[in-house]
Image: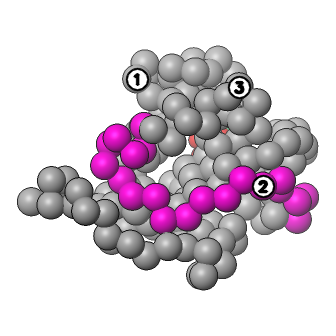
Amino acid sequence: MERTFLAIKPDGVQRKLVGEIIRRFETKGFTLVGLKFMNVSRELAEAHYDVHRERPFFGSLIQFITSGPVVAMVWEGDGVIASARKLIGATNPLNSEPGTIRGDFGVNTGRNLIHGSDAPETALHEISLWFKDEELVNWAPEIKAWLYE
Ligand code: UDP
Ligand code: MG
């Protein structure tokens, strides 16, 4: 089954949205397989956002993501990568549809609450960047027969 990397950013943590955000992926039907609450080193932040290194917002993005704790997670399910991106919403929360996380709780691109991997290759790369293999939990939720035909 497919896996994706999600991280509740420091604004989501500070605004006490951790439970609300996790709830959305849980109730949708995805399975949590990795979870840690952590401060992010500059090294990890720069590796994670390496594709944006040349962009004008890179400095402020690294400053922001290292400014307070984040909730790093791995979620599993059929099509979870694309579906999580839909649940998260557009990068600029002013353009995110109501009902999405960013659409419901954000007003600014630099404070858009949550990260989600954008493709299978980036998901694999980000999961290995943030989690050791032994930190991921392989388990089969009992509810599975009621989620999948
Ligand atoms: N970002 C920003 N200003 C911008 C574009 C992006 O601060 O003009 C930040 C924002 O936090 C965004 C992250 O950089 O979530 C990564 O940008 P990307 O285009 O990959 O958006 P995402 O995949 O998070 O929707
Ligand atoms: Mg991105």
Question: Residue 99: which disc?
Answer: 1
Question: Residue 38: which disc?
Answer: 2
Q: Residues within 10 Å of mark 1 (few under 14, many from 20)?
A: few
Ligand 1 lies in quarter: top right
Circle 3: residue type: Arg
Location of mark 3 (residue): 15
Q: Of callouts 2 and 1, which one flags the residue occurring earlier in the amino acid sequence?
A: 2
Position of residue 120 measured from the top left corner of the image (x, y, whole percent): 45, 67
Report the residue at 59% width, 69% height from top: 127
In which quadrant of the rendered view does residue 136 lie?
bottom right
Q: Is mark 3 within 8 Å of ligand 1?
A: no
Q: Is residue 43 above or below residue 118?
A: below
Q: CA distance from mark 2 to mark 1?
A: 28 Å
Asked whether 64 or 141 is in front, the reply is 141
Is 28 inside the magenta-drawn segment? yes
Q: Nearer the viewer, mark 3 or mark 1?
A: 3
- Secondary structure beneath disc 3? loop
Q: Residues within 10 Å of mark 3 (few under 14, many from 20)?
A: few
Magenta segment boundaries in residue numbering: 24-43
